[in-house]
Amino acid sequence: MASAPTATAPARPTGATAPDRPAGAVRRRQRLRRALTGWAFSTPFAVLFLVFMAVPVVVSLVMSFTDLRSTDLRNPLAVNFVGLDNYARLFGDDLFLRSSVNTLVFVAVGVPLTIVLALAAAVALNSGLVRFRALFRVGFYLPVVTSIVAIAVVWRFLLDPEVGLVNNLLRLVGVDGPSWLFDPKLALPSLIVMAAWRNLGFLMVIFLAGLQTVPAELYEAATLDGATRWQQFRRLTLPLLRPTLLFGGVVTGIGYLQLFEEPFVMTQGGPLSSTLSVSYHIYNQFGFGNYGYAAAGSYVLFVAIVGLSLVQFRLLGSRD
């Protein structure tokens, strides 16, 4: 008698692999792998940012509301919370007010002067009328990469009242030159000219890059329409260069509000505090051990920088 057939599992074909895992599990593993890779690359930066940026900012902000002095570092329990006293003290400090006025004058005169000189140099080098343009570019940019100490030595020689080149040239035309860096009325303007000369090359390179993005067809069309070079500059170049001008103005304004190197190496804030800047005053307060007071000054300067940047965005058009 024939036996009944039994159900058996189908034989696996020779060379077949194990069945694929569910697609959802594979996608989860891929997402986890991508997430771990992202964290592995971003964690070092996050740690450095927290240690060297975020934590110092928070600590200095808290410090500005205390009377912390250098003598309190060994005894933190002696530090007192003083609220807004440091900020109120700043606005009653004659030296801080004098340094604020000096800094504002430096910004109000130095920023437009630097932008105008840099724009004029960029337009001249972009026009094709100047020969040896590469040489001029290097010459204008050289002060940007030169040490401020070397620049100070050169300018102190130029402005020396006895043997300086400027006064010697003035004597040739019968004029007695003043004591540029030793006269309270002329020391700050002298530093402004020096800073404008030093920063001219940086802005010139930026403006030159902006000018080279303006299509030449626009100038050709304007020429065919009879527009003069001045009209082309006013109606074409300036409007199209507005985002670049905004960037240059903001960067230069921030740099000049943080004015420190020029008075530090040239005049040490003198004579009669005529070149004392806010940053230099804060630096002195840290040197005197008034840490809480100096931190408050730093935040006042920070608010001034934010305010000036907002004004510039407002004037030149935040839409760009």
Image (cartoon, grey):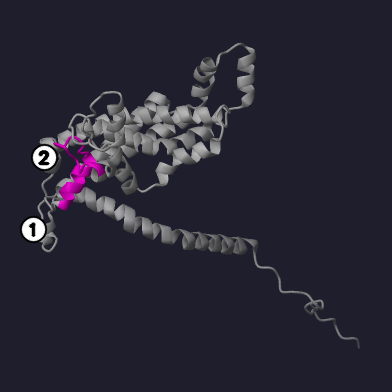
Residue at 64 percent across and 20 percent down: it is 220
The CA distance from mark 1 to mark 2 is 20 Å
Q: Is residue 143 left or right of residue 93?
A: right
Which label belongs to residue 78? Answer: 1
Quarter the N terminus occupies: bottom right
Q: Is residue 174 magenta?
A: no
- Mark 1 Cα within 10 Å, few/some/many (few <14, many 20+)? few
Q: Is residue 283 magenta?
A: yes
Residue 295 shows in the view: no
- Front residue of 291 and 219: 219
- Mark 2 residue element: helix
Q: Is residue 249 above or below residue 77?
A: above
Residue at 20 percent across and 31 percent down: it is 101
- Mark 2 Cα within 10 Å, few/some/many (few <14, many 20+)? some
Q: Which residues are magenta?
A: 266-287
Q: Is residue 137 above or below residue 35?
A: above
Residue 302 in which image quadrant: top left
Q: Is residue 318 left or right of residue 256?
A: right
Residue at 53 percent across and 31 percent down: it is 125
- Front residue of 9 and 177: 177
In this view, the residue farthest toward the top is: 226
Q: Is residue 93 left or right of residue 229?
A: left
Indicate the amino acid at tag 1: Ala
Image coordinates for residue 137, horizontal then vertical, percent: 50, 38
Image coordinates for residue 49, horizontal then vertical, percent: 37, 55
Residue at 17 percent across and 32 percent down: it is 184
Indicate the amino acid at tag 2: Arg
- Front residue of 113 and 161: 161
Mark 1 vs 2, N-terminal side: 1
Q: Nearer the viewer, mark 1 or mark 2?
A: 2
**Residue designated by label 2:** 89
CB of mark 1 within 8 Å of CB of mark 2?
Answer: no
